[in-house]
Image (cartoon, helix red, strand yellow):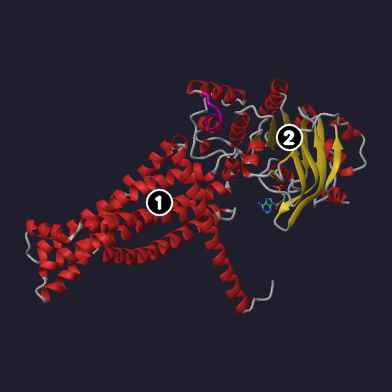
Amino acid sequence: MENNDIPAIEARSLTIGYGKRVVQKDLSFAIRSGTITCILGGSGCGKSTLMKHLFGLYRPLSGDILIQGESIVSASSEEDRHRIMRHFGVAYQNGALFRSMSVAENVALPLREFTKLKEPEIQAVVQKKLQQVGLDGFGSFMPSDLSGGMVKRAAFARAMALDPAILFFDEPSAGLDPISSANLDRLILDIREQTGATIMIVTHELPSIFTVADRIIMLGAGAGGIIGDGSPADLKEHTDSDFVRSFLNRRTGDPAADMDNARS
Amino acid sequence: MSKSKGIISQVGEATARIFQNIYGLIEFTGEVVSGIGDAFRHPSRVRWRETISCMNRCGADGMPVVALICLLTGVILAYHSAVQMHKFGADVFLPALVGCTMVRELAPLMTAVMVTGRSGSAFAAEIATMKVSEELDALTTMGLSPVRFLIMPKLIAMLCMVPLLTVVGDFIGIAGSMGVGVMELNMSCETYLQLTRQWIAPKYVMEGVLKSFVFAWLITVSSCWCGFRTGSDSVAVGNATTRSVVTSILLVVLGDAFLAKAFSVIYEIAD
Ligand SMILES: Nc1ncnc2c1ncn2[C@@H]1O[C@H](COP(=O)(O)OP(=O)(O)OP(=O)(O)O)[C@@H](O)[C@H]1O
Ligand SMILES: [Mg+2]
């Protein structure tokens, strides 16, 4: 149930894709402020694409995206769009750290560009963020000298640097060991508690979904639209879709058949 | 798979692509110009540290190879001229010929070609790699302008360093030709230098330097543009690099032809 307050993110019959290629069509959902939403779906079904449209990197083929009631699609000027996008913290699937800068400089960059903090304060924030993601002491490393999981965590730290109101994480815990992954879940919950941020996560890690998610939005393969939407417990037990149930119960089965189910 | 297209539609598509590219480049140039405006209005927002490290890479590191190429160009030009001029007893005009050609034409051009190969290709590769690894996307979503963030440091560095390299190239090219004059035509160093000073007007040096500003601009803008409009796989990085070198050298030579005419007109009007 949506109450009267404005949803943090709202998609209205959104069709997303690249050029003529439609990846998902007719997506509609509203995300309440301060909730954690997981986007699930098979590989290649368009989770990252959906995220990139939501945070304004690409324009949707049709439909509208409202951020706190304000359309990011029909924003009148580039400046308006950027002002809305300032609310976002984004951690890309592959990290997308700036490889010409050290990890600490990467995290410090948004602080240097968008705040008037003095250098020592910036360093303090950077230290704190790196500590939170367990990268204490790696500040001076270049991104190319980090492991894949460490790059992800560094990207996570960079996304959090400005304590944004809306955070997008694309598979933050993929490739992490169970302990780091659990720490990251803890961190996500902490962030929400401390800053009240709205968080959207793409992830495949079931334990992590059941720990953090308030709501799951599941995308079907082949532009199948939203095939599951609800709280994790709800979806796990009561849903018509075999695919959704198999996914959440991690049931073995014929993945091809499941995919077909998801399509139908 | 598809039937091979007729020659007319192929030519049509290629032409359309060329015009799209020209349009894109002009549009991009506009963005860069407005970026320069911003840089003047808020100098503190320019990334000076990056600019200086870029100056180091384009200027200081490129110095030896630019010096070498200009030295050799001076020597070769002087040698061929000396052989011919000696036949007509025109030895005393060697410094004028080589000096003017070097200062007005060859030093700026050779420097531009070397800088394209060293720095232009590096710019294109850097930006193309950033595109492939989604770093450009990350910049955009952070609300940072790629023009300000990536291009301004390179542009400022190039606008400072290419003219400087050109002036160094002037001196070294003349020194090379002096070696030929001294050894082949038995001139003394003093005579050679005196003749050089007599024939090379300051306006010619200025002409070369002005040209090199234009070249620096053309190389930076076209290389960065090639980086930006690359595809998103790793083959694309190689393609972007190749295209940047070809485009830059083409634009430099075109610009040179245009400027050569422009300056001769200017001199005519001034005289
Ligand atoms: N830049 C692009 N241009 C064109 N098509 C793209 C582009 N990026 C992704 N696609 C296509 O869009 C579809 C969805 O890709 P996307 O990256 O969103 O999948 P995903 O759900 O995030 O998968 P994964 O779980 O593997 O990360 C894919 O079929 C892919 O081929
Ligand atoms: Mg993805």
| Label 2 element class | strand
Question: Which part of the image, by quadrant, shows the C terminus of chain B?
Answer: bottom left
Can the viewer see residue B198 in this picture? yes
User: Dot 1 corresponds to which residue?
Assistant: B119
Name of the residue lying farthest toward the bottom: B7
Front one among A5 and B12: A5
Q: Over which residues does the magenta segment extend?
A: A111-117
Q: Is residue B73 magenta?
A: no
Between the C-alphas of marks 2 and 1, the distance is: 41 Å
Circle 1 marks a residue in which chain? B
For the point 9% across and 74% down, which residue is it?
B89
Left or right: where A102 falls relative to B143: left
| Label 1 element class | helix
Q: Ligand 1 within 8 A of label 1's CB?
A: no
Name the kind of residue labelled 1 in the image.
Answer: Ser
Question: Which part of the image, by quadrant, shows the N terminus of chain B?
Answer: bottom right
Q: Quadrant of ligand 2?
A: top right
Q: Is residue A105 above or below residue B132?
A: above
User: Dot 2 corresponds to which residue?
Assistant: A200
Q: Which mark is residue A187?
A: none
Q: Position of residue A135 (x, y in %)?
A: 57, 26
Q: Position of residue B108 (x, y in %)?
A: 31, 58
For the point 34% across and 55% down, which residue is it?
B212
Can the viewer see residue B61 in this picture? no
